Image (cartoon, grey):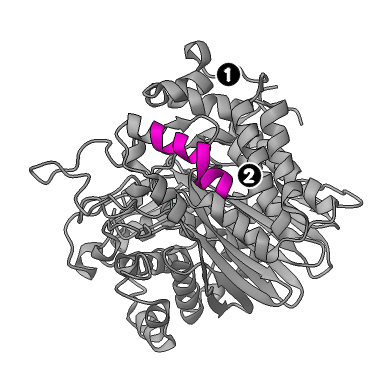
Amino acid sequence: MKTSSRGRCCRAAIALVFLAAAAHAASFPAARGAGGAVATAEVDATAAGLEILRAGGNAVDAVIASALALAVVHPQAGNLGGGGFAVVRMGNELVTLDFREVAPAAAGRDMYLDASGERRPDASTLGPLAAGVPGTPTGLHLLHARLGSLPWRDVVEPARTLAGDGFRVTRRLHESIDNRSDLLATFPETAKVWLPNGAPPPIGSTKRLPLLADTLAAYAVDGPAALTRGPVAERVVAVSRRHGGILTAEDLAAYRPEWRRPIRFEAFGWRFASMDQPSSGGIILAQVFGLLERLGWAELEPGGADWFHLVAEAWRQAFVDRLLLGDPSSSDASAAELLAPARLDRLARELPRDRARESRSMVALGAPPAESAETTHLSVIDRDGNAVALTTTLNGSFGSKLWVPGFGFLNNEMDDFTTAPGRPNLYGLVQGEANTIAPGRRMLSSMSPTIAWRGDERFVFGGQGGSKIPTASSWVALGALVDGLPLQAAVDRPRIHHQWLPDAIQTESDSLSPETRAALVARGHAVVPVDFTAKVCVARRLASGLFEAAGDPRGPDAGGVVDPQ
Ligand code: GLY
């Protein structure tokens, strides 16, 4: 059944979210229920999380089951060969886990530059030289070991079943492969699995990944050692080497996740916990919410020029500060410094209400570097109100495009480092000196897994979309928590984006009225329409005790014929 573009997007999004509800009472458009909430990018992954909640698992068990399912059914971003961040609230305990990839021991600052100092095309995005040491196998297991409640093997089982018995190839997956078939065909290992007979698996066909099922079975028994040592690890290293990579068995075995303190802040009557460095996401959110509250943003007329101007200027400021960030060991600033109340007071005072600032006048730096857009976010709340915001990534869609048999795609996360200082990365984002490449260092991220709460209410959010993650995530939270929009309306609301450089407000086609656009241009803003690829997933517990979940209708992968569910 074909429908109009906007209509089919919304319907597709509805298929992505469910609630673990004893009395499932789905209402259009956000899903509602009484047993908990799971929101992920794929129906099969959401179902895996729900299965675990129904089996008595907690939010941590469910989010891990969903994340592993995504490694099977959503190979664009779900992974064993990448990394991510988890923000968890269990009872009153708040923790974050950093399982971000790290640079291999043989990596170096100028590894992507040629003899004349120019960036070598594709070196940091295509093939295993682009891969950081994966953190997912150890990270998910550690998260479960500390905070899970069901046996580990039960949590892995839904993903193993999907890989072994097979899953249905969606239009979204088919088109994602088709759109990148030239790059995926670069590697015979990838082409064999994802381009059989030279074409993507047909929509509606059943895809089995028996070697990955074997690996997941071993992971269920032996934990991360099944992937970071022994035959699977040897295969990762051999396939990487075959195509010019530098990963070693020692790199894989040495990887360690890190528990970190969350970024905590309060704004608009809500408390928030988000991810600190090596992500920039939590600092950006805290700064933007702090500035907007000081500027009286909630009192402005929604949709007017003042309203958009202040958000754009707050984001511009936050992305300037982002230049200082990186791995905590190399960062030039801390959250405490950047978010100090006196500093936010001053920044709010100095923020001009009547004119756009010039990005390049705010910091002395050459041209901007870039970040990649395919990542995936999961939001889960269990019936007790425990909550997990988990964002996991390969960086680009299908990461490095190199599929390691029985393991999955290797990430291309090295492109999130400052690979050529002063130049823009995959997302047009300029990065700073603190984020240069060094062995064992974590690359700066924009991932923004965040939990907000007010009394018994919970609001768990985050997204995918590279540098648009923190702006899209904060925009959705502002819509629901400050403007009081219904959950799905907050996700669907047309967005704007600003990331300092390029020096422009980026807009969806229906974000601004002609009058507002003209008023923003008159203040000196460049206004540039773009295709938005950021997608946000939200789970919420309302004051009534009911749960809601919402997915995002956006992006080329979300459209097309609605899949019957
Ligand atoms: N690779 C996207 C991010 O970490 O922000």
Residue under label 2, please give it. Answer: 219
Label 2 environment density (alpha carbons within 10 Å; few <14, some 14–19, many ≥20): many
**Residue 233 colored in magenta in the image:** yes
**Mark 1 to mark 2: distance in Å?**
27 Å
Q: Which residue is mark 1?
A: 201
Q: Is residue 234 left or right of residue 32?
A: left
Q: Earlier in the sequence, mark 1 or mark 2?
A: 1
Quadrant of the image containing the N terminus: top right
Q: Quadrant of the C terminus?
A: top right
Q: 168 above or below 352?
A: above
Q: Residue at x 56, y 56 (%)?
A: 139
Please state the total of marks drawn on the protein image.
Answer: 2
Q: Which residues are magenta?
A: 225-239
Q: Position of residue 223 (x, y in %)?
A: 62, 50
Horizontal side, residue 497 vs residue 551: left or right: left
Secondary structure of residue under mark 2: helix
Which residue is more in the foreground, 128 or 59?
128
Q: Amino acid at mark 2?
A: Tyr
Tell me the amino acid under the disc marked 1. Answer: Pro
